């Protein structure tokens, strides 16, 4: 667990520090729906480098947001899913998705207005 989070005196700050990283929210967005193997998750997010996906998953696992299940078989099988506290964050991600859609529409309107001038 990331003990230095206890030094952050603001709950919003704790959340912000946990979610730092370009891809963490996107990873959580995909894991909200189902469990993924590494290759599946990488194919779902083709713009992320494999090493960076590994790093982000390790950080989320260390922070208790993502669970990594290793199956002892040949070839090795590893699956990723959200932990219970990670699942509690899903409604926040869903609201962010809604807000993001509204913001994209605003940007499109602003772009259309700029073209009219």
Image: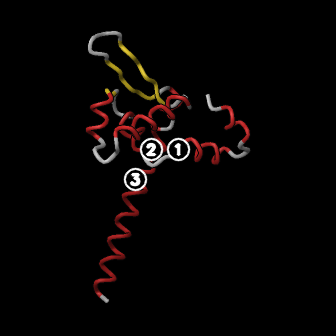
Residue that sits furthest to the bottom in the current view: 117
Q: Quadrant of residue 115?
A: bottom left
Q: Which residue is mark 1?
A: 19
Q: Is residue 9 above or below residue 102?
A: above
- Counting the numbered discs, the total is 3
Q: Quadrant of residue 38?
A: top left
* Position in image of residue 34 (x %, y %): 33, 29
Q: Secondary structure at mark 1?
A: loop
Q: Which of the two residues, 46 or 94, is positioned nearer the viewer here?
A: 46
For marks 2 and 1, give the CA distance.
7 Å
Q: Which residue is mark 3?
A: 98
Q: Quadrant of residue 110?
A: bottom left
Q: Earlier in the sequence, mark 3 or mark 1?
A: 1
Instruction: Please report contact status of discs 3 and 1: CB closer than 8 Å, yes or no.
Output: no
Residue located at (35% from left, 21% from top): 78
* Position in image of residue 85 (x %, y %): 53, 30
Q: Which residue is mark 2?
A: 25
Quadrant position of the C terminus in the picture: bottom left
Instruction: Please report contact status of discs 2 and 1: CB closer than 8 Å, yes or no.
Output: yes
């Amino acid at each position: 667990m990331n003990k230095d989070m206890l030094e952050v005196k603001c709950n919003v700050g704790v959340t912000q520090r946990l979610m730092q990283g370009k891809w963490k929210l996107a990873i959580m967005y995909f894991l909200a729906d189902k469990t993924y193997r590494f290759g599946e998750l990488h194919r779902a997010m083709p713009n992320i480098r494999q090493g960076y996906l590994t790093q982000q998953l390790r950080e989320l696992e260390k922070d208790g947001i993502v669970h990594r299940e290793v199956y002892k078989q040949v070839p090795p099988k590893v699956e990723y899913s959200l932990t219970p506290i990670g699942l509690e964050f899903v409604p926040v991600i869903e609201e962010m998705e809604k807000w993001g859609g509204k913001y994209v529409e605003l940007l499109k309107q602003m772009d259309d207005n700029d073209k009219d001038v």
